[in-house]
Image: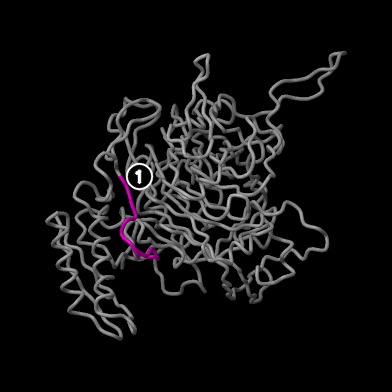
């Protein structure tokens, strides 16, 4: 386009004029139909040539132009025209693209303040819980970038990160060390949406038969910021809008509250809801199906899950078995078992089984060394309602599309779709098989209707403005050896031979290649313009809709969403101002959706 040509010419000319072999400041003005974009960047280039520096400036200029297209604030101009709309696989109506990122511009960086849509974290992932356990990695924004082949890449590496922090319980300074670094990128308080269709093209990281990585593509309600435990405490994953005095203390923003303060609506229950598009469980089950899976599923697989609270408090299904739906009796008429309480009317298809291994998390009274506090009245059960989808090696080699259709709120539904081979038997019955993993037919893998949630605990399909998250975690509680021999020291350093027994065979050698990475080819979000065409509540765009505000609450509790020393000392707000990429803002959404606070 003319604007793109102007941007290219301006960036090239200015870059050439400001090159230095030491430290240079490049200021480039890009004019496009939306706004005048200013790049003001200091670069240290002791070994760079004029051509390489100019190229980097040009790439940055193109990135900025692509993220501020003429058709929408959030649509990437590299999105092919035929993908500007899609047809719902549930209701058959047309949905329109509202956000896309094709990641075609190489060498993009995503550290705080580098990108108008995304933020890659630079902090420890402190997922400690009352049951113990915790993450083994440190999130470092340098692991997240775009490659020349048009992929967002999140690398996972063996690299030690150590820091000192003050333990307020023991009243002493202690050193903490993580032996892996990895990446998380999120659109928190920048790009949010409520309802619609999400499609992500993913190449999964690592090897299919080696467990130990925990990659995920997911959505979280904007009231909670992923890995910032203080922001999610007693908010995650509540999706409940009823006043129940027994649950009021456990749900921080309860429908019982006549005043919720900080711009929140009175008598409205809120939470940091979670929808997991996929979470990988890698490993090798020797080709044998896992127990209680129907149809039989073996490792590796992905979880597709709705995390929701309040959860079922009593008579829950047991891990490792499907819920007991009927009562058996002895010949004399005595019950041998009780029907368990769980969600009915969940449907699966293809190589997909309801998940019998994880039914949720009990968030109990906290221990003294946890990063947040809950008393016994604030303890609660959260449920994980979901399914396992069989994977094959091809999922780790080429991009595969995962799709979620989200109709929010009361009367809504969640539907997961994957690609497989569609077959028809001699009786005309349609079925799906995974085969070699190259099938291109849509498979309706999982469906969760709102009435299934309402009937059990009164919860609902999430209605919170939500943001996107891509990350690769490494946790001793996920796809690691289930139990260790008594002689194993239970340490997690691949460079220490005595720790070998704590890892799955081959894990450390795989990590030592330096080639482990999750790759995202594209992400797209579509919404309906016709509220009557779908069930549930209307679709909205933005992090602070009138019906579900978040801005003032986040501003009022900024400390919950911010990094602390020693990871940062000078930040005054949770997000830094976007210096490389912001133009003059006509409306808040032009510069990050209104979530970024400036001086």
What's the residue at 65%, 59% (across, down)? 506
Position of residue 488 relative to residue 210, above or below, is below
- The image position of residue 31, as x and y in percent, is 14, 61
Q: Is residue 171 left or right of residue 579?
A: right
How is the protein colored in the picture?
one colour
Image-quadrant location for residue 285: top right
The image position of residue 63, as x and y in percent, is 27, 60
The residue closer to the viewer here, 594 or 202, is 202
- Left or right of residue 469, residue 4 in this image: left
Badge 1 element: strand
- Quarter-wise, where is residue 142 in the image? bottom left
Percent x, y of residue 369: 67, 63
Q: Residue at horizontal 52%, vertical 24%?
A: 431
Whether 176 is drawn above or below 523: the answer is below
In this rendering, position of residue 376 left or right of residue 347 = right
Q: Which residue is mark 1?
A: 524
Q: Indicate whether 299 appears above or below 155.
A: above
Furthest-right residue in this view: 332
In the image, is residue 100 part of the stretch drawn in magenta?
A: yes
Examine the rendered structure and indicate whether residue 53 appears above or below residue 270. below
Residue numbers of the magenta segment: 99-112
In front: 50, or 436? 436
Measured as percent of width and height from the top left, residue 401 is found at 43, 42
Helix, strand or loop for the magenta stretch, by majority: loop
For residue 31, side relative to residue 401 (left or right): left
How many marks are shown on the rendered structure?
1
Q: Quadrant of the C terminus?
A: bottom left
Residue 198: in magenta span = no
Instruction: Give the residue at x 48% y 48%.
Output: 217
Q: Nearer the viewer, residue 163 or 524?
A: 524
Question: From the image, which quarter does the N terminus lie in?
Answer: bottom left
């Amino acid at each position: 386009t003319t604007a793109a040509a102007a941007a290219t010419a301006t960036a090239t000319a200015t870059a050439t004029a400001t090159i230095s072999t030491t430290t240079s400041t490049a200021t480039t003005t890009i004019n496009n139909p939306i706004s005048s974009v200013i790049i003001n960047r200091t670069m240290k280039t002791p070994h760079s040539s004029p051509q390489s520096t100019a190229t980097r400036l040009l790439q940055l200029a193109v990135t900025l132009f692509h993220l501020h297209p003429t058709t929408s604030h959030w649509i990437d101009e590299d999105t092919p025209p035929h993908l500007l709309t899609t047809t719902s696989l549930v209701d058959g109506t047309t949905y329109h693209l509202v956000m896309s990122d094709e990641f075609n511009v190489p060498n993009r960086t995503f550290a705080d303040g580098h990108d108008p849509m995304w933020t890659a974290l630079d902090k420890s992932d402190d997922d400690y819980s009352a049951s113990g356990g915790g993450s083994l990695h440190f999130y470092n924004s340098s692991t997240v970038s775009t490659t020349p082949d048009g992929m967002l890449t999140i690398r996972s590496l063996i690299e030690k990160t150590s820091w000192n922090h003050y333990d307020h319980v023991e009243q002493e300074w202690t050193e903490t060390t993580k032996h892996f670094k990895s990446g998380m990128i999120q659109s928190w308080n920048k790009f949010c949406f409520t309802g619609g269709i999400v499609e992500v093209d993913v190449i999964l990281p690592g090897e299919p038969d080696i467990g130990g990585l925990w990659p995920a593509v997911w959505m979280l309600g904007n009231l909670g910021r992923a890995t910032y435990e203080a922001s999610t405490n007693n908010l995650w994953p509540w999706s409940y809008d009823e006043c129940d005095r027994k649950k009021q203390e456990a749900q921080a923003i309860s429908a019982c509250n006549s005043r919720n303060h900080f711009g929140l609506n009175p008598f409205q229950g809120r939470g940091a809801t979670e929808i997991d598009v996929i979470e990988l469980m890698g490993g090798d089950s020797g080709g044998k199906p896992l127990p209680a899976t129907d149809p039989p599923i073996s490792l590796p697989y992905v979880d597709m899950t709705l995390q929701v609270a309040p959860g079922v408090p009593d008579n829950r299904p047991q891990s490792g078995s499907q819920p007991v739906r009927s009562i058996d009796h002895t010949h004399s008429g005595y019950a041998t078992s009780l029907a368990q309480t769980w969600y009915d009317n969940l449907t699966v298809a293809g190589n997909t089984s309801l998940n019998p291994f994880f039914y949720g998390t009990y968030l109990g009274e906290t221990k003294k060394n946890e990063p947040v506090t809950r008393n016994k009245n604030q303890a609660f059960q959260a449920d994980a309602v979901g399914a396992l989808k069989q994977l094959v090696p091809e999922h780790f080699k080429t991009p595969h599309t995962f799709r979620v259709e989200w109709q929010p709120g009361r009367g809504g539904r969640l539907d997961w779709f994957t690609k497989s081979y569609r077959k028809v038997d001699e009786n005309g019955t349609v079925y799906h098989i995974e085969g070699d993993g190259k099938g291109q037919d849509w498979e309706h893998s999982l469906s969760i209707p709102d009435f299934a949630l309402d009937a059990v605990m009164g919860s609902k399909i999430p209605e919170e403005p939500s943001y996107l998250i891509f990350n690769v975690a490494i946790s001793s509680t996920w796809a690691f050896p289930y139990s260790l021999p008594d002689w194993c020291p239970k340490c997690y350093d691949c460079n220490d031979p005595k720790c070998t027994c704590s890892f799955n065979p081959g894990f450390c050698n795989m990590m030592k290649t330096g080639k482990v990475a999750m790759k995202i080819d594209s992400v797209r979000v579509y919404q309906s313009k016709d509220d009557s065409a779908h069930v549930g509540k209307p679709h909205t765009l933005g992090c602070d809709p009138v019906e579900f505000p978040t801005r003032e609450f986040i501003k009022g509790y900024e400390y919950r969403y911010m990094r602390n020393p020693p990871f940062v000392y000078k930040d005054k707000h949770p997000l830094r101002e976007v210096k490389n990429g912001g133009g003059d803002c006509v409306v808040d959404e032009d510069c990050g959706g209104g979530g970024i606070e400036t001086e």
